[in-house]
Amino acid sequence: MENLTKKDFTSDQEIRWCPGCGDYAILNSMQKALPNLGRKKEEFVFISGIGCSSRFPYYMNTYGFHSIHGRAPAFATGIKLANPNLSVWQITGDGDALAIGGNHFIHALRRNIDINILLFNNEIYGLTKGQFSPTSQKGIKTKSNPHGTTDTPFSPSDLAIGSQSSFFARVVDTNPRLMQSIFVEAEQHRGTSLIEILQNCVIFNDKTFDAITGKDFKKDAQLILEDGKPMIFGSEMNKGITLNGLKLEVVTIGENGVKEEDVLVHDAKEEDPTLHSMLARMQPPEFPAALGIIRSVKRKTFDSGVLSQIEHEKENSKFKTIDEIINSGDTWEV
Amino acid sequence: MKKNTEPIDLEKVVIKFAGDSGDGMQFSGNQFTNTSALLGNDLSTFPDYPAEIRAPQGTIAGVSGFQIHIGSIHINTPGDIADVLVAMNPAALKSNRKSIKKGGIIIVNIDSFTKKDLEKAGYDNSPLSDNSLDEFQVIEAPISKLTRESLKDSKLSSKSISQSKNMFALGIVYWMFNRPMTPTENFINKKFSEKSEIAKGNIKVLHTGYNFANTIEAFSSSYTVKSAKLEKGRYRNVMGNQAIAWGFIAASEKSGKELFLGSYPITPASDILHELAKYKNLGVKTFQAEDEIAGICSAIGASFAGNLGITTTSGPGFSLKGEALGLAIMTELPLVVVDVQRGGPSTGLPTKTEQSDLMQALYGRNGESPAVVIACSTPSNCFDWSFMASKITLEYNTPVILLSDGYLGNGSEPWKIKTIKDMPDITPLIAKEGENYQPYLRDKKTLARKLAIPGTKGLEHRLGGLEKEDISGNVSYDSENHEKMCNIRSEKIKKISEIIPIQEVYGKTNADLLVIGWGGTYGSLYSSVDNLINEGKSIALTQFNYIHPLPKNTLELLNRYKKIVVCELNSGQFANYLRMNFQGIIFEQYNKLQGLPFTTLELESHFKTLLD
């Protein structure tokens, strides 16, 4: 296996995202992550829909397809079924995946086709210049709703879990190291791996994730989950998450008799998604935002199911060619 | 019954099975078809059924019919009107009353002519007792009663017994036309191999019907239809949708490309999906997508990754696929879109035939987005056209739209089985490892670009819907490049006319009237023109399969005729397309928008008027 580096994955195209856009960090992390996967460069395919994020494939020196708005999961599904040896990555945004492409998004997840979806969630439409998206906070004022939205936003994690998602992770565009490791884990998971990236749009929705990513308080606003580890966070690493009845609670270890062993231990592999869903819903200021791999369970993939049926039929059928098919059954000679 | 009477030999006969949509008329019709095919008759069939699975029982809306035309001569259409009608209830009689030949035979299930059934069909009085059917020979058969009687000792439920009455009707018709019952018996035994009670019951009822016809003295004679003089070879009966599916598999074998179908169920195209889904043993991948758009997009994805990607649909679904089809045109990938047309606009007439998606196929996309458009014209040549559509799309790397219609898709006829090795070769245009690959560098002759398949070392590249720079394929907003690329995409399609055969004419090259048709109207147009030629009329027919591009001799051909009439099942879409392409030529029109095929009678009468 040749030694690949970030440079091998960098295309010669000029990058056209706005200066300061969170997308740069994501691209950079991806180019650094791919050489660690032990795969050949020609096996990677990046598929996107429409939107700022969807320009991503042009900047990757891999096979790539910038398709049409919302439909990338369908293209990715066709590609993976055509050649299951490929490593297929879908790049999408909150408008592309959750508005126009909502249908394909949920169906990819429920089928569990073996692809990786990077959901760049900036809670706004960037490319069309600043309209609200299905994840925009309720009440946000934009050009297309100057009096404030009356829409209730989607929760991507709940949508994913409701669609039987087998892998859901969340990262922030300000943490490249976490992104790189999650990208690697997503690729190694068999099935649809969904990574929600909280991504800042400097032009139309700047600082929208500041409550999570702000330098001064991010340690108190982020819980980076690790499978098998207690859910401890905070600038002094003394805060933890416990379950009180049916609700999560933030506790301080050493206060009110709370001990480290009272804190919940993360189990990403738990089939029951209830706790995963509760963790994914946590929001500052009451809670830290959960980052890292929230859910990762084993489930048969769609592509392996399709292919094993084909293999089985090929082995067990007496018909091997179309000639044999059309000459079988009721035929007669003239 | 004069049992010793020799059967009367008929050259051709049209039989229609009609009943409630749950009465199993499609089954009876298909069985009669297969048996007649095995006897060597030429034939053509036309199922006519309601859009609802079970429309209100006993009503006109719920009538399901299956018409079959068999002959010892060449048969091109399912026939205009029936010589024999089997009517399982009053509604079936009423809805077919106008399409039975004078002097024809009507077999009615007398048990379903109760007051309630007559009311449901809208009859005030029973047509069996008011002399309104005097011009026909009516045979009243107690089909329900005798079916029950014959199965009274079986363990079958009363529902199963009632469902067997179509076999009684089939038995009667088998006797009338001296058909053997063995093929149907074999079929039933196989179909119900794990439900032997049902198999036994059905076969018993079939025999009961046969014996009933033999015993009663209602039939003055039975009939035979001798085998037709078909070209030597091995034959089978085939439906249009089935033939399309097989043509794709043949193309997949011939090209060495795996076949991928992305599709969403829609009437009347779903049978192509059903047929292809059977052949996992041949490596066929079928993906029932979440919607029409995902169907086409997954097929484009599969083509990008090296498969022969196809998608199948009907009008409403074809509308939804427009944007993705534009992407396949921009990215110049192989893709066949099959549109089995039905009555429109909107949901329209899902189970009825029409040719009204032509303009949509030609122009129904944003931007200048030319695609190859091909139309099938008989149920069996659907095989050849899906094969050719695949060949063109793989050799030119450009999408092909294949138009069929409900009449072709569900219709059937005998097919002389093709041998795959005799089909033309297909050579996909693909770049190899080590090439200095430029995604939009073109073959000088065909203007086709090469594909580079993901997984091929060193050929990594990006495609997309944004305008491409000539040769490099990089994104380009340059105005002159855009115009150049639009021209190239258009020119590339035009160049395909170099490889397509010249347009042929049936009839004299200088006839007084040239009839033009395209696609699925071939059978009725051919029959009517053929009849008129035999009557000594100066008339000719040309039927188009290649719509875009048109065969290169089209103008020269049109110029030979003084009078031209374009016949189509829409309001004149092909006529307008010809006017656009060939200004100065006068095209008369004959159009029909009733969800039904042309009858040869109406065509002949119209052509005679034009010839006067």
Image: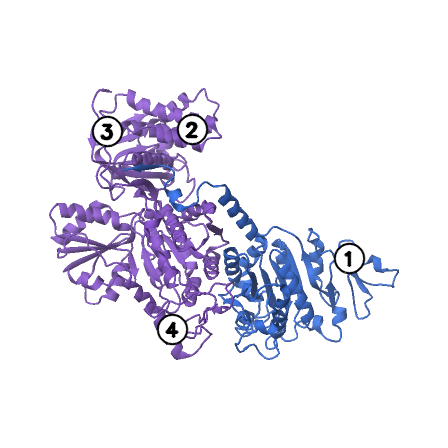
Chain colours: A blue, B purple
Q: Amino acid at mark 1?
A: Val
Vertical position of residue B421 compared to residue B563: above or below: above
Q: Which mark is residue A265?
A: 1
Pointers 1 and 3 in contact (CB under 8 A)? no
Q: Is residue B487 left or right of residue A128?
A: left
* Callout in the foreground (4, 3): 4
Comparing marks 2 and 4, which lies closer to the viewer?
4
Label 2 SS: helix
Q: Which residue is mark 3?
A: B223
Compared to residue B140, the image places residue B391 above or below, namely below
Label 2 Cα neighbours within 10 Å, binned few <14 / some 14-19 / many ≥20: some
Residue at the spot 81% in from the left edge and 67% down from the top edge: A237
Residue B423 is marked as: none
Q: Are marks 4 and 1 on the same chain?
A: no
- Are the residues flagged by discs 4 and 1 in contact, CB closer than 8 Å? no
Q: CA distance from mark 1 to mark 3?
A: 84 Å
Between disc 3 and disc 2, the foreground one is: 3
Determine if marks 3 and 2 fall on one subunit.
yes
Tell me residue A73's x, y (percent): 53, 60
Q: CA distance from mark 1 to mark 2?
A: 64 Å
Q: Quadrant of residue A296?
A: bottom right
| Residue that mark 2 sits on | B162
Question: Hey, what amino acid is under mark 4?
Answer: Met
Q: Which residue is mark 4?
A: B485
Q: Are marks 1 and 2 on the same chain?
A: no
Q: Amino acid at mark 3?
A: Tyr
Chain containing mark 4 = B
